[in-house]
Image: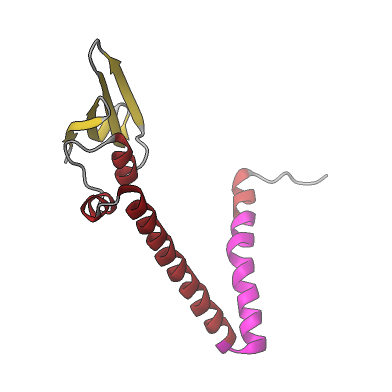
């Protein structure tokens, strides 16, 4: 009769496979080829990652410049700034999508509270008030 493995045993086996197997394979690779090839591979991977991030940032800047045609607005958006009179679209480009939105429709205006940086149940570090599609104020908790 086979012994059943517990959750702790299964976690230990998974840890050995995830951590131990790559270490074992790298040690065998180093024994057979030396340190030069693995170091070149690691440096190449790091270089590709840096190049990818820089290219991604450059493409985002080009996209924002073609979209807004104003360098001052583009720099504010890239810096993640909030200002009164900022449009919803500019706010999304600067801060990303909100975690939650409270929407109130009145006779003459639409008021929305965009919530960012959730800290707990209905607790947010940043609340931005948007009326009729434009930022009118914000409350940032320290």
Q: How many marks?
A: 0
Q: Residue at point 61% right, 44% down?
A: 7
Q: Nearer the viewer, residue 116 or 120?
A: 116
Q: Position of residue 52 (x, y in %)?
A: 46, 66
Whether residue 35 is visible to the viewer of this picture, yes or no, is: no
The relative height of residue 25 versus residue 9 in the rendered view (above or below) is below
The relative height of residue 39 versus residue 127 in the rendered view (above or below) is below
Q: Residue at point 52% right, 77% down?
A: 44
Residue 15 sits inside the magenta stretch: yes
Please state if 36 lies on the left or on the right of 133 as rendered: right
Principal secondary structure, stretch drawn in magenta: helix
Q: Quadrant of residue 32?
A: bottom right
Name the residue furthest top.
Answer: 107
**Start-end of magenta stretch:** 13-36
The relative height of residue 17 versus residue 24 in the rendered view (above or below) is above
The N terminus sits in image quarter: top right
Q: Nearer the viewer, residue 25 or 78?
A: 78
Q: Quadrant of residue 24?
A: bottom right
Please state if 139 lies on the left or on the right of 69 as rendered: left
Q: Residue at point 18% right, 34% down?
A: 138
Q: Position of residue 115 (x, y in %)?
A: 29, 32
Name the residue furthest right.
Answer: 1
Q: Position of residue 5 (x, y in %)?
A: 69, 46
Q: Residue at point 35% right, 48% down?
A: 67
Q: Nearer the viewer, residue 43 or 91?
A: 91
Q: Position of residue 58 (x, y in %)?
A: 38, 62
The C terminus sits in image quarter: top left
Please state if 82 lies on the left or on the right of 49 as rendered: left
Whether residue 4 is visible to the viewer of this picture, yes or no, is: yes
């Amino acid at each position: 009769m086979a012994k059943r493995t517990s959750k702790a045993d299964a976690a230990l086996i998974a840890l050995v496979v995830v951590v131990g197997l790559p270490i074992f394979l790298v040690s065998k690779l180093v024994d057979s080829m030396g340190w030069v090839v693995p170091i070149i591979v690691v440096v190449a991977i790091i270089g590709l990652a840096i190049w990818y991030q820089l290219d991604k940032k450059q493409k985002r800047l080009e996209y924002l410049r073609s979209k807004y045609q104003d360098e001052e607005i583009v720099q504010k958006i890239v810096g993640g700034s909030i200002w009164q009179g900022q449009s919803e679209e500019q706010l999304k480009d600067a801060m990303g999508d909100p975690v939650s939105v409270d929407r109130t429709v009145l006779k003459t205006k639409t008021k929305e509270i965009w919530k960012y940086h959730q800290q707990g149940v209905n607790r947010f570090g940043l609340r931005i008030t948007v009326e009729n599609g434009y930022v009118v104020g914000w409350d940032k908790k320290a």
